[in-house]
Amino acid sequence: MENTTIKKQTIFSGIQPSGQLCIGNYLGALLNWTKLQDDYNCLYCIVDMHAITVRQNPAELRRRSLDTLALYLAVGLEPEKNIMFIQSHVPAHAELAWVLGCYSMFGELSRMTQFKEKSVSNADNINAGLFTYPVLMAADILLYQADLVPVGQDQKQHIEITRDIATRFNSVYGDTFKTPEPFIPKEGAKIMSLTEPTKKMSKSDLSGGSIFLLDDRDTIIRKVKRAVTDSGSEVRYAEGKDGINNLLTIYSCFTGKTIAESEKEFGGVGYGDFKLAVGEATADALARIQSDFKQYLSDKEQLNGILKESSERAAYLARKTLSKVYRKVGFYSL
Ligand code: ATP
Ligand code: LTN
């Protein structure tokens, strides 16, 4: 009989342990990761080296790295199906980043939106790491010959530059890297801040605009109640209604209903009652994640075991690509 076995494609993605994960990270990235784990070879990284492009408290960074793994597990990523590891545990990421830096152009890095935005929000620390951030991200992805990269909308530009770097390298040295595709959810790709609905929600915003995955029920309901909306009264998805559009998106992501169904459900209902429903749906969805998180976090030995085994598997795969790259660029080997 003909061999019909199809090799599974590879997925790589990562989240910075730069704060408590928020529902933007969950709906834009993590939720998709859980859906992909059965059909792909998946590597999910905790990118601590990216996190230090912004000043971090060392003790907190250490703690959050482990919290992030516990959250990966709590949202349903199974250790048997996914390689979940910490970036700094696999030195090949830094090693490939150096090489790729020599094939990345100053001009293209200067055009990155995230660099421009973070240069404004961290004006006192516009360091070289912030500038070369996309090069390290390209190394993360290209090391594993990833086919798909599930991320939120904001990372699309970084996947594009990854593709450009890969293509440039391949054109000089012959086929070396696979060029990856972004995988962005239809709904939830860009969850906006509750207090400034024209800005993306982010885990490092501590001003009340972000709902964190570990926020308790009352906090979630209070934050949604205070969410900025418009002066109208109709729960409808429309231009100029950024706040309501965002709440409708959050509601539909957490309940599995479409935007149209949600609009219908709240026809004739005031903003106050609608906000309460959004808060409750969010809190309900997060309650299970929170109780699983506590359980996973209480077993540090299990978490360390997962990290150790995963980083060994990742290092093995990464080394194969790195050796090929070193050979191609002409590094002498013993
Ligand atoms: P920071 O505030 O520290 O810059 P962040 O909240 O932007 O962090 P990242 O670690 O940069 O989070 O991103 C992790 C993943 O979450 C990425 O795939 C990113 O695209 C996605 N993501 C981040 N914010 C949102 C959002 N508001 N809506 C949808 N996806 C998001
Ligand atoms: N830059 C990403 C985090 C990240 C990443 C990656 C995502 C680092 N390396 C590789 C996908 C693939 C961000 O979300 N800010």
Image (cartoon, grey):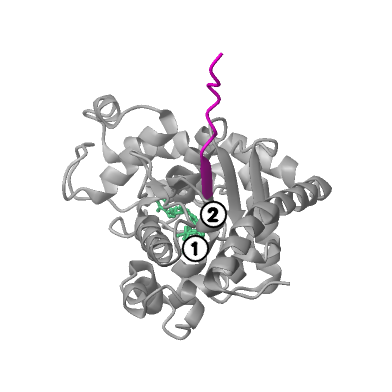
* In the image, the residue with mark 2 has its CB under 8 Å from the nearest atom of ligand 2: yes
Residue 117: quadrant of the picture? bottom left
* As drawn, 108 above or below 268: below
Q: Which residue is mark 2?
A: 14
Q: Residue at x 70, y 62 (%)?
A: 89
Q: Depth-wise, is mark 1 or mark 2 nearer the camera?
A: 1
Q: Is residue 63 left or right of residue 236?
A: right
Tell which quarter ligand 1 is in: bottom left
Q: Is residue 267 shown above or below 67? A: above
Q: Earlier in the sequence, mark 1 or mark 2?
A: 2
Quadrant holding the N terminus: top right
Instruction: Kindly identify which numbered label has been placed on residue 306.
Output: none
Q: Residue at x 35, y 58 (%)?
A: 160
- SS at badge 2: strand
User: Looking at the image, which residue sits at the far right?
Assistant: 301
User: Residue tagged by mark 1?
Assistant: 137
User: Where does the magenta region start and end?
Assistant: 1-12
Task: Classify mark 1 as within 8 Å of ligand 2 or not, answering yes or no.
Answer: yes
Q: Quadrant of the C terminus?
A: bottom right
Q: Amino acid at mark 1?
A: Met
